[in-house]
Image (cartoon, rainbow, N blue to C red):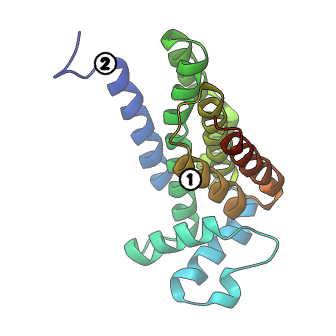
Amino acid sequence: MEFSGIKPIYLITAILSVAVVIFAANYPLLSTDTACRHAPMAEAFADGNWIEAFHPRFGIGLQILSGVLVFLTGMDGYTACAVMASLAWALCLIPLFRVADRVFDRKTAWLAVACFLISPQALIWALKGLREPFKLLGIILAADVLVSLVKRDGGVVAEGMAAVVLLVCFKVDAVLLAFLLVVAMLTMDRLGR
């Protein structure tokens, strides 16, 4: 059964993803990291207080995206962090499906998406407004880039750079992974793959 060419499973996945983002906007879970670090930094960014908005120990991505959301909507920093992290969580579904579909098959891809949707840890990170969903999105995008390189599909530069930006700007501990992805991309390019 299809609705105007859209299969129900696509519709259900999209509805669940949107529901999580809406839920995060209304009922974010408590996290001391978000309450004491990320939310005040996002609010400082929205106020134009660059000294308080950035810290060398943290990546710049979450406070910039959440700060823009605070500035545009007037919501508090904590809720903005939860909404942005939930959006990153929802965006993980697209490259996850693509990787599983290209490596295995369509049925396994849907199973991977279903497992991700019910995975409590990733969802808790998102609802708490933490940076981990962005790192997870970067890792899944990196996996998709590597699959494209191995299958010689091409067109991986934009996706690879998005993965590098996510890995570097949101979690400083992922810099090595970002570096290795760039090395893999350059090596495969030199080999003519």
SS at badge 2: helix
Q: Which residue is drawn at 46% across and 55% down?
A: 25
With respect to residue 159, does 100 lie above or below?
above
Q: Which image quarter holds the N terminus? A: top left
Q: How far apart are marks 2 and 1 (CA)?
A: 28 Å
- What residue is drawn where x is 22% and y is 15%? 2
Would you identify the image quadrant in which residue 167 lies? Answer: bottom right
Direction left: furthest residue = 4
Labels 2 and 1: the sequence-earlier one: 2
Q: In which quarter of the image is residue 129?
A: bottom right
State whether residue 167 appears in this view. Answer: yes
Say which residue label 1 marks: 28
Residue at 69%, 86% (x, y): give it: 52
The answer to whether residue 63 is above or below residue 139 is below
The answer to which quarter of the image holds residue 120 is: top right
The answer to whether mark 2 and mark 1 are in CB contact below 8 A is: no
Coordinates of residue 137 in the picture (x, y in percent) = 61, 44
Percent of width and height locating residue 192: 65, 38
Residue type of the residue flagged with mark 1: Pro
- Between residues 7 and 28, which one lies in front from this camera angle? 7
**Discs 2/1, front:** 2
Query: Can the viewer see residue 29 in this picture?
Result: no
Specify whether 76 is left or right of 44. left
Task: Using residue 72 as the reference point, say whether residue 67 is left or right of it.
Answer: right
Q: Quadrant of the C terminus?
A: top right
- For label 1, the SS is loop
Report the disc number at residue 16.
none
Residue 118, position in %: x, y?
59, 26
Mark 2 residue type: Pro
Residue nearer the viewer, 54 or 83: 54
Of residue 149 and residue 44, the one placed in the foreground of this image is: 149
Instruction: Give the label on residue 8, or none.
Output: 2
